[in-house]
Image (tube, rainbow, N blue to C red):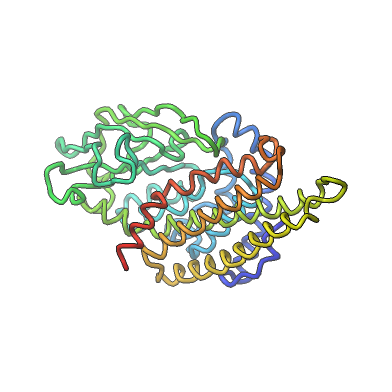
Amino acid sequence: MSLDSLSRTAYDDDHEAFRQTVRQFMEKEIAPNQAAWAEAGIVDKDIWLKAGELGLLCPTVPEEYGGLGLDFRYNAIVAEESSYNGRVTTGFSLHSDIVVNYIVSYGSEEQKREWLPKMISGEVVTAIAMTEPGTGSDLQGLKTTAKKDGNHYVINGSKTYITNGQNADLVLVCVKTDTEVQPAWKGVSIVLVEANREGFERGRNLDKIGMDEADTSELFFNDVRVPMTNCLGEEGKGFIYLMSELPQERLSIAVSAQASAQRAFDDTVEFTRDRKAFGKPILDFQNTRFVLADIKSKLQVGWAHLDWALNRHAKKELTAEEGAAAKLWHTDLQWEVMDKCLQLHGGAGYMNEYPIARAWRAARVTRIFGGTNEIMKELIGRTL
């Protein structure tokens, strides 16, 4: 199976040539390791170096920093093929679609030259630490502080649900550099923290419902000293930076959700064609055909919308509410597809040995991370 049979408007021949490289990598290096990585609860760090060698990490980074200088649609291809053919949450999207953009957009020249080449090669794995125990989606309620001491910040606090937390070599930490200023968002900054800093500790690799192979961690900061030059951009502008990069993050989530839904559908068509009940294939029952026909129609609409969003984003025209809407719609579709496809697998769908079971579990979180879908509705509603 592949995504080649779809009629797409977001990609040209160069994009599709890149897709073939990505697909071969996913089929050879990623998919065969799914079970082992799921058992370990973490992706082998060596795979980052292999991905870097092929140019699959951070393809949008400008050439002057060792990147390919490509558009976000190349990132989208990595996300699509990872969801469809890799079936593994590698952490690449967090690294390439989210973290790197902050450094490219707001980093100092020194920060860019220090970190971007290593992120492209896979030598450095990154994470971004926003969420704290008790704050959830409320970034203005941060408790982690970075207090000035001479020409250093001293960071104290904790973070949770941090993707790539166990593998990360560099963490972009959202902190309060001013706890008194009002409104509270004016006191938020982003500080780069290297994982080898004294006082930085990784907590548990959290036990999740799904995405078993993705390391998701608690992080602790106990008097962690970093130079003030580690501040990303201007002090106090962190909240603005975070808000400006969210459309791409949410579009990235939508891309992965759509591709994983397509794979679940394709697998289910094959399963119902082969599995028999009462002497005939399950696919021959009208209910099965109607359910799958409904899904196929919605997937068709989904791909058209996704291409529209990707093309708008490539032209830097995708708005915050459009990014929120993409995340909302595609993750809701993903869950609908997963649940109906699992049902059509019958008892087999409840067994982890079948891909639909793992996909169903993994899909549940996509309506939560990147901002819950309820928050997406609130953001869209504010523009009415």
Image position, residue 326 (x, y; %) = 46, 61
User: Residue 254 or 53: which is nearer the viewer?
Assistant: 254
**Total of numbered circles in the picture?**
0
Image position, residue 275 (x, y; %) = 81, 46
Which residue is painted at 46% across and 69% down in the image? Answer: 314
- In the picture, the quarter occupied by the C terminus is bottom left
335 versus 169 height, above or below = below
Image position, residue 73 (x, y; %) = 52, 64
- In the picture, the quarter occupied by the N terminus is bottom right
Image position, residue 356 (x, y; %) = 66, 44
Quadrant position of residue 318 = bottom left
**Is 342 on the left-hand or right-hand side of 249?**
right
Which residue is painted at 37% across and 40% down in the image? Answer: 171
Quadrant position of residue 161 = top left
Q: In the orientation shown, which residue stands out farthest toward the right?
A: 279
Which residue is painted at 84% across and 46% down in the image? Answer: 278
Which residue is painted at 32% across and 53% down in the image? Answer: 242
**Is 246 on the left-hand or right-hand side of 75?**
left
User: Residue 264 or 142: which is nearer the viewer?
Assistant: 264
172 versus 41 height, above or below = below
